[in-house]
Amino acid sequence: MILCANFKANKTRQETRAYMAVVESFVAANEIEDTVMVFPPFTALEHLSRNVLIGVQNAYPAQNGAYTGEITLEQLDEFGIKTILIGHSERRHVLGETQEQIAAKFRFFAENGFVIIYCVGEPIEVRELGDKALMQYVDAQFEGIDCNYTDLIIAYEPVWAIGTGLTPTTDQIVTMHSALRAKTSAPLLYGGSVKVDNAQSIMELDNVDGVLVGSASLGANDFCEMIALAAELKQV
Ligand code: 13P
């Protein structure tokens, strides 16, 4: 399993340090073999972990340059960062990134050998239009994206499930993940209101290879509990 904690714009550097100390020692003490990734805000990137992968939530696709307010490859290299989220719903819908920009970002970070967690997912009004419209919408989010990229991980995060406490039904997740499986052999994560209570039942679904967790990952102990649930699954 792959377990990812996306902090979004939460936590200070100090808080991230304390969090990482808890998660790292949990992973070490329990000899966790699953992949654990944390995506803190840029200001907390000091931390280079050994048993937990640190990634960024975003970056500008350039070596360096005149991109006010952005950070680029040069800054990521300094921290040894080789993992990035691309296409997150909040970048698409809150910050207005277009598919063209997202595809350019994907190409750049793929050329630079990053592990890319590529996020897709539909808003509620699209889901309400039915399966055909839903698949067309998600297909369009793959425009310009190389589904055969070696270090690709896909995250399906329905916009309406993010931060809302709503989750799709088991059938809805399985249907979407099997459609994604037909496109790519990359690991498939589910994200959107994953909590300690529902993490295990989501992780045991067909074609779910892990979870991308927002608010419920902010508590280090909660995130550790989800890591433990994933480890338990392997033993059954
Ligand atoms: P929540 O877990 O807070 O719904 O957020 C999901 C998400 O966007 C993770 O990237």
Image (cartoon, helix red, strand yellow):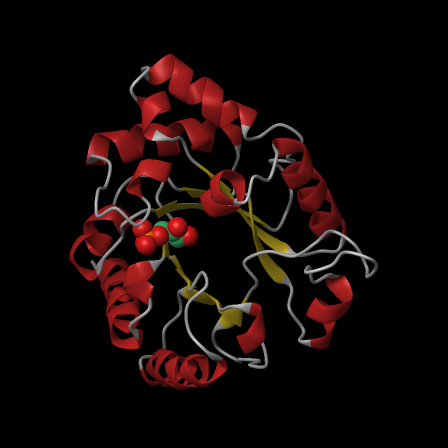
Where, by quadrant of the figure, is residue 135 drawn?
top left
Q: Quadrant of residue 207?
A: top left
Residue at screen point 40% across, 15% down: 133
Q: In x, y percent, where is residue 71?
A: 70, 62
Residue 138 in sight in this render: yes
Residue 210, visible in the rendered structure = no
Q: Residue at x 76, y 49 (%)?
A: 111
Compared across the picture, whether 152 is left or right of 38 comes to right
- Taking the spot 42% from the left edge, 64% from the top edge, the residue there is 7
Is residue 164 depicted above or below 65 in this figure? above
Compared to residue 133, the image places residue 228 above or below, namely below
Question: Quarter of the image containing the C terminus?
Answer: bottom left
Question: What is the quadrant of residue 81 in the picture?
Answer: bottom right
- Can you say whether 137 is above or below 115 in the image? above
Residue 80 x, y percent position in the rendering: 67, 73
Image height of 99 relative to 41, above or below? above
User: Is 74 left or right of 81, judged from the image as shown?
Assistant: right
> Camera-side residue: 204 or 157?
157
- Quarter of the figure that contains the N terminus: bottom left
Horizontal and vertical percent position of residue 229: 23, 63
